[in-house]
Amino acid sequence: MNAQADTTKSKADKPEPETEKNWWLKFYQDTPFIQYLDNAHREDQEEILAFLSVHTPLPEGAVIYDQCCGVGSISLPLAGQGHTVYGTDLCPQFIDEAKRRAEILKVQNRAHYLLADATTYTTPSPCDLAVNLYTSFGYGDDGVNLAMLKMVRGCLKEGAPFLLDFPNFYLVISSFRKHIVRHIDTATGTLTVNREAAFSPETGRLLQEWTFIEADGKRSCQKSSLAVYLPHQIKDMLRQVGFERIELMGDFHGTPFGVNSPRCIALAR
Ligand SMILES: C[S@@+](CC[C@H](N)C(=O)[O-])C[C@H]1O[C@@H](n2cnc3c(N)ncnc32)[C@H](O)[C@@H]1O
């Protein structure tokens, strides 16, 4: 999920919103976030696939793990290239949709989507590549987040790459926007997504209140909470779980990381 993507006016400071523990269990299931994801990946899917083909070339019939896969936006095309894919997510709606899309694309025999917790799940065979895309990391406390990295490390063949796509918090902080509005074209009309954001200096987290307003006027509100990890902290955590070579890039064009980069993309082996 994009931590900060676009801007509008800012509002006066509000008290920090309280966020439920394990907020992600409700957030994705109870909102039209699927539209948000589809819109984002319509824009970046080709770029990410091109990035992978350059930076993580795969053998024929490779095994790939899509950790926190959502609806499988990136792993489905990889299954379409003949690779075997395992995807896990905790959102039942997303897993059902990933399976449905796998059937439409006729890749259901090699695209396996499971409702499972990525902090405990292991793939049935060692993988040639693992990905964790679009800010699917940093939701829990440090222990939970490390567990997610530890599990993904354990799913990989020796020396195989793991791609972690996280916000660049230098940029999020330096161009901080408290109020963000997006209007997204969907098949059923415009979806408006309002976000109120605040940092919690107490906990070192980015707290956001999301309001989704669908074309028929239906509103849903959810809160999210994301650990603020700077690039060196991401690298430290990756090293702690056994990755040895870690390259940081700032976008899916493979630009070397800089403080103004849009993303913090770690390629770890
Ligand atoms: C912003 S979405 C991104 C989904 C997908 N990676 C993509 O690029 O479209 C984050 C996803 O992480 C999933 N997630 C968060 N924590 C998880 C966990 N512990 N185990 C499995 N999935 C998790 C959420 O359910 C949600 O679908």
Image: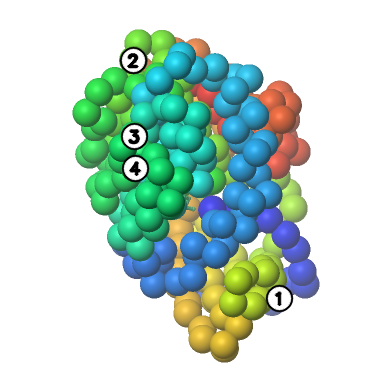
Answer whether residue 113 is visible to the viewer in this image: yes
C-alpha separation, residue under disc 1 versus residue under disc 3: 48 Å
C-alpha separation, residue under disc 2 versus residue under disc 3: 19 Å
Q: Quick check: 249 above or below 32?
A: above
The numbered dot on residue 110 is 3
Disc 1 marks a residue whose amino acid type is Lys
Measured from the top left, where is residue 140 in percent x and y?
Answer: 36, 50
Residue of label 4: 108
Disc 2 marks a residue whose amino acid type is Lys
> Would residue 265 be found to the left or right of residue 203 on screen?
right
Measured from the top left, where is residue 61 in percent x and y?
Answer: 40, 20
> Would residue 162 be found to the left or right of residue 23 on screen?
right
Q: Nearer the viewer, residue 52 or 68?
A: 52
| Marks 4,3: beta carbons within 8 A | yes
Q: Residue at x 71, y 30 (%)?
A: 253
The numbered dot on residue 11 is 1
Label 1 neighbourhood size at 10 Å, few (<14), some (14-19), many (20+)? Answer: few
Give the mark nearest the N terminus, 4 or 2.
4
Disc 3 marks a residue whose amino acid type is Arg
> Quadrant location of residue 176?
bottom right
